[in-house]
Amino acid sequence: MNTVSVPITKLASGTPMPLIGYGTHPLRGEDAARAVTTALEVGYRSVDTATRYRNEDGVGEGVRRSGVDRGEVFLTTKLPPDAVGRERETLAQSLKSLRVDYVDLWLIHWPPGGSAGVKAWEAMIQAREEGLVRAIGVSNYSLRLLDVLHESTGVYPEVNQRQWSPVHFTNRMLRGCHDRGVVVGAHSPFRSARLDDPVLSAIAGRYGVSPRQVIVRWNVQHGVAVVPKSAHRERMAVNLAVDFTLTDDEMRTIDELSEVG
């Protein structure tokens, strides 16, 4: 079992969350179980799944096989938008599939019908109060929708997970979430990035690392919780090996790769 130092952020509820986690989509069944076991052996302590991924059973099995204590693993799952009105039943099924008593972070996977989903958010607040989840958040929300949830309930999401890479970087979203006490989460950090971009390649060359490692480090230095995905042990380990520090100029140069206005 590897011991890796992963940076931690503290969510609004006080829950500590690793800034580098393991993404499990689209793995299922035995593939998901093996991959999660391997990721935890490599040193990950955060695992990201969702009801819609249909792999919570495999993820839970992988956690058990790893031998890592449940309290050391930060588990995230997500409520599908079409489960609005059935939040309690959906969470109960997630806990049953994962075979755990609680999840560390529960997200609304997408704005339901383009709305903020206030009723779903109220159910999530209740679940947190009952100890079924430690922290709550959303995925793919705009700042306006975050504000609607706060205006309706007095509670901001603790995390807003979005498709996030140098191509998708927006300082307005990053600062807006920070000002609201919301941690930005990054899913699909490599899928949309141009890994052969000469800027990323040049920076990677200076540190003797890969462009993927540069992207992970860039997220970490922005305080963004990133969940890279790979089913291969070697690449899992490489994605965690980001104990170098980008300069302010390098951070700005990567920010400027954004295609978001």
Image (cartoon, rainbow, N blue to C red):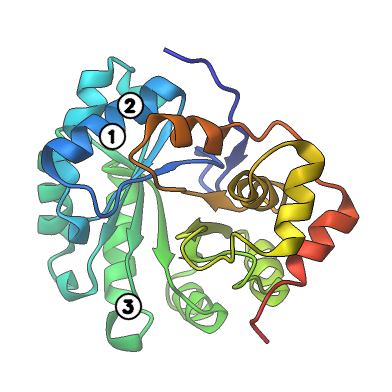
**In which image quadrant can residue 98 be found?**
top left
Q: Which residue lies at the image location 67% right of the left edge and 62% below the top edge?
A: 178
Q: Which residue is mark 2?
A: 38
Q: CA distance from mark 3 to mark 1?
A: 33 Å
Q: Height in image: 170 above or below 21?
A: below
Q: Which element carries disc 2, helix, strand or loop?
A: helix
- Position in image of residue 215 (x %, y %): 63, 52
The local crowd at label 2, few if under 14, some if 14 to 19, many if 20 or more residues have their Cα within 10 Å, is: many
User: Camera-side residue: 203 or 77?
Assistant: 203
Quadrant occupied by the C terminus: bottom right
Residue at numbered disc 1? 35
Task: Tell me which corner region of the image, top left, top right, bottom left or bottom right, holds residue 175.
Answer: bottom right
Marks 1/2: CA–CA distance = 5 Å
Please give left or right for residue 122 compared with residue 96 in the image.
right
The numbered disc on residue 117 is 3
- In percent of width and height, residue 145 lies at 47, 81
